[in-house]
Amino acid sequence: YPNPTDGLLNICFSSNDENPYNLKLIDVTGRIVINENQKAAIGNNQYQLNLSSIAKGMYILMMQKGDAIIQKKIVVQ
């Protein structure tokens, strides 16, 4: 949240372990705009992604943790 965003995107999730996860922001042409590796804490996690330098448009935010992959459409305005 918020989505659409004009700068900062908050990513919130819960984790049962302290394993690493990967965040990718992919544009409509399939190009990876952001690729970050982070480490989850046990319990609730919040990560803030700064999109202020990203061009306006629609993107796919992909989060991968182990075998699990979540994808969400993100609009930068």
Image (cartoon, rainbow, N blue to C red):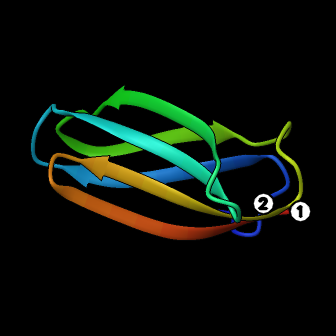
Look at 15% across and 54% down and name the residue there.
67
* Displayed quadrant of residue 5: bottom right
The answer to the question of whether label 2 and label 1 lie on touching residues, with beta carbons closer than 8 A, is yes
Q: Badge 2, how many Cα within 10 Å: few under 14, some, many 20+?
A: some
Look at 54% across and 58% down and name the residue there.
61
Indicate the secondary structure of the residue bearing disc 1. loop
Indicate the secondary structure of the residue bearing disc 2. loop
Q: Badge 1, how many Cα within 10 Å: few under 14, some, many 20+?
A: some
- Image-based side of 53 in relation to 26, left or right: right
* Displayed quadrant of residue 75: bottom right
> Residue 28, percent across and down?
70, 65
> Residue 8, percent across and down?
73, 45
Look at 45% across and 43% down and name the residue there.
23
Q: What residue sits right under mark 1 in the picture?
A: 77
Q: What residue sits right under mark 2 in the picture?
A: 5
The first of marks 2 and 1 along the sequence is 2
> Residue 38, percent across and down?
37, 28
- State the residue lying farthest toward the left: 17
Q: Which mark is residue 36?
A: none
The three-letter code of the residue at mark 1 reads Gln
Mark 2 and mark 1: Cα distance apart in space: 6 Å
Relative to 45, residue 4 above or below = below
Q: Nearer the viewer, residue 33 or 13?
A: 33
The three-letter code of the residue at mark 2 reads Thr
Q: Nearer the viewer, residue 32 or 15?
A: 32
Relative to 55, residue 74 above or below = below
